[in-house]
Amino acid sequence: MIVIPKEKPVHNQLSTYYLHLDKFFEYSKREQSSGCLYFTSTSAKGVVFFDTDEILNTVYVDGNNGESIDGGDAFTKLLDAVNEQTFQVAVYKIELNHIYSWVGLHKLNPLDDEFPLDTSSLDKLVNQLQSLDFSGYIEAKIDKDEGLLIFQDGKFVCGSYSWGDGALASDEKNLKLLIEKSNGSTGNFIMKGTMSSEHEFFDAASKSESKIEKAPSTTIATLEELLDIFSRVVDEDVDIDTDFPILLKDKFVEKADRYSFLDPFANEFKFVDQKIKYTGNASDEELTKGVAECVRELADELGVLQLLKQEITTWSTYLGDDIKKISANFL
């Protein structure tokens, strides 16, 4: 069983045929700070939950036999499946202080008959489950609207709603709105969880609150994509003896007087193995201007500037608008 947010995804219908998954995972962690990637194909589904630092959990469901696994084995299984067939990918944002409540929801089972529940209204059901110290979730389908409410020890933790904007609501406003929508309407409620004090599925929530911090700037991730696309254009369309990293480094040295962070002796900016390592204090705008200026001049010298812009336009469909903005403003 896979449980994902009810909101519209931040990105949808991306194809693994085009995506470089390792870099896309890193890009998603930097862009969203926390959330999940939902994979679907004709024969399998998978979801990967992540925060700013790491992949928290993966759930993989084989559509042929219904087998469901999670953890590291599921992540490996998903990557193997992606190499064999094309998946569609959707990206959902989940707030960093709530992500740990989502990673284990797939383990929950429907409540048994030991706890007779009043499902005549959502309001009564919520009140009853809270009084029973319920830990788990309620999935509510009311006409065209849907909601998913997560509880721990009877306390409302967070909710997810089909009318939301991608930032999951932590307050009670949308909960009250969902209850109002249910009044006088025919609702279908699914309850999964436990009245026990042992919550294996909430173990991840015990992570230190120090994990909840501002996500790194998306600028680095976007510049990585820019340099990655540029390197592929050069490798495929330019007949030269010098490797791309050396050409790029030489251009950085040439611009070091204007952009001090590019000075190799300062050791603030490195591009190694398709990754940027940056320890300087330049603003995002200054960093973008410096790197983009080097890319523009080097691409022009190699005769591939227009081709690079075309490639960026193509890839911006899958990587978001940030890289397209860099192309429009700086290249």
Image (cartoon, rainbow, N blue to C red):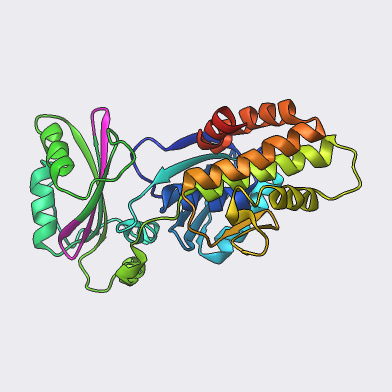
Q: Main secondary structure of the magenta part?
A: strand
Whether residue 14 is in magenta: the answer is: no
Nearer the observer, 166 or 244: 244
Residue at the front extreme of this rendering: 257
* Residue 199 sits in quarter: bottom left
Q: Left or right of 124: which side holds 319?
A: right
Magenta-colored span: 142-156
Residue 228 at what x, y percent from top left? 68, 45
Residue 143 at what x, y percent from top left? 23, 28
* Residue 216 sits in quarter: bottom left
Instruction: Using the rendered image of the protein, determine whether residue 221 is visible from the camera's viewpoint.
Output: yes
Whether residue 150 is in magenta: the answer is: yes
Residue 65 at what x, y percent from top left? 57, 50
Q: Left or right of 142: which side holds 280?
A: right
Nearer the observer, 323 or 177: 323
Instruction: Using the rendered image of the protein, determine whether residue 40 is visible from the camera's viewpoint.
Output: no
Q: How many marks?
A: 0
Q: Is residue 183 above or below residue 35?
A: above
| Residue in the picture at 36% in, 68% down | 204
* Residue 324 sits in quarter: top right
| Residue in the picture at 62% in, 31% down | 331
Residue 46 at what x, y percent from top left? 52, 50
| Residue in the picture at 33% in, 52% down | 95
| Residue in the picture at 14% in, 29% down | 185
